[in-house]
Image: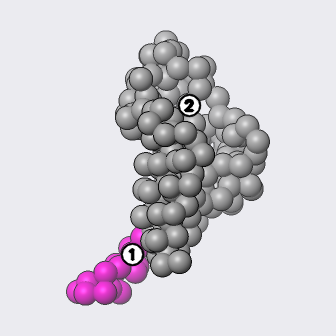
Amino acid sequence: NSLNWGFDEALRAMAAGEAATMMSYNWMLPTLNNPQGPAGALAGKFALYEVPGGKAVLGAWHWAIPRNAPNKDASWRFISWLTSKRMEKQRVILGGAPVRVSAMKDPEVWQKGFGQAYYETVLKILEDAEPLARGPKAEEIIQVVGTELNAAVAGEKTAEQALKDAAAQVRKILGK
């Protein structure tokens, strides 16, 4: 019954002990292991592992300053401060998703954060991770491919047909 699940539904299933595994973002693990979090008595029993086959999806968030922003310099100073090495370390210790290798290799982060094994596993995952798509049309491509793959999982199409349809739509998006 997970065809239409989002993050919340997947997290609730894991927290309730109704799922054996979850393929999602590593930053969801600390929520599951938080004794005051949704998993209750199961907190602390969840672990992070590399994706079988060794190929994970690399997600990304971006900070941007709109072209028509009135305070571009102030915006840039804020982004620079927020993404600085010092702030990254503080943010990761408080439970934020690590993005700097230096934070993931920092013994203080290990001690105050989620432990050395967690951050070393994140690094292993990132070594071989790839984005689902690249370029200015990436989000549109991800949406199309996800919709087609969902149709295969739902039994609406064969996997072969879903992949053919996804490829045709991606070619159309890219103008090829």
The part of the chain drawn in magenta is 63-83
Circle 1 residues within 10 Å: few <14, some 14–19, many ≥20: few
Circle 2 residues within 10 Å: few <14, some 14–19, many ≥20: few
User: What residue type is disc 2 on?
Assistant: Met
Q: Residue at x 69, y 40 (%)?
A: 51
Q: Nearest the camera: 158 or 112?
A: 158
Does dot 1 land on a helix, a strand or a loop?
loop
Position of residue 18 relative to residue 9, above or below, is above
The residue wearing badge 2 is 22
User: What residue type is disc 1 on?
Assistant: Ala
Outermost residue to the top: 41
Position of residue 96 relative to residue 67, above or below, is above
User: Is residue 105 visible to us here?
Assistant: no
Q: Is residue 45 left or right of residue 156?
A: right
Q: Are marks 1 and 2 in contact (CB under 8 Å)?
A: no
Q: Residue at x 60, y 60 (%)?
A: 131
Q: Position of residue 93 (x, y in %)?
A: 54, 46
Q: Residue at x 44, y 36 (%)?
A: 156
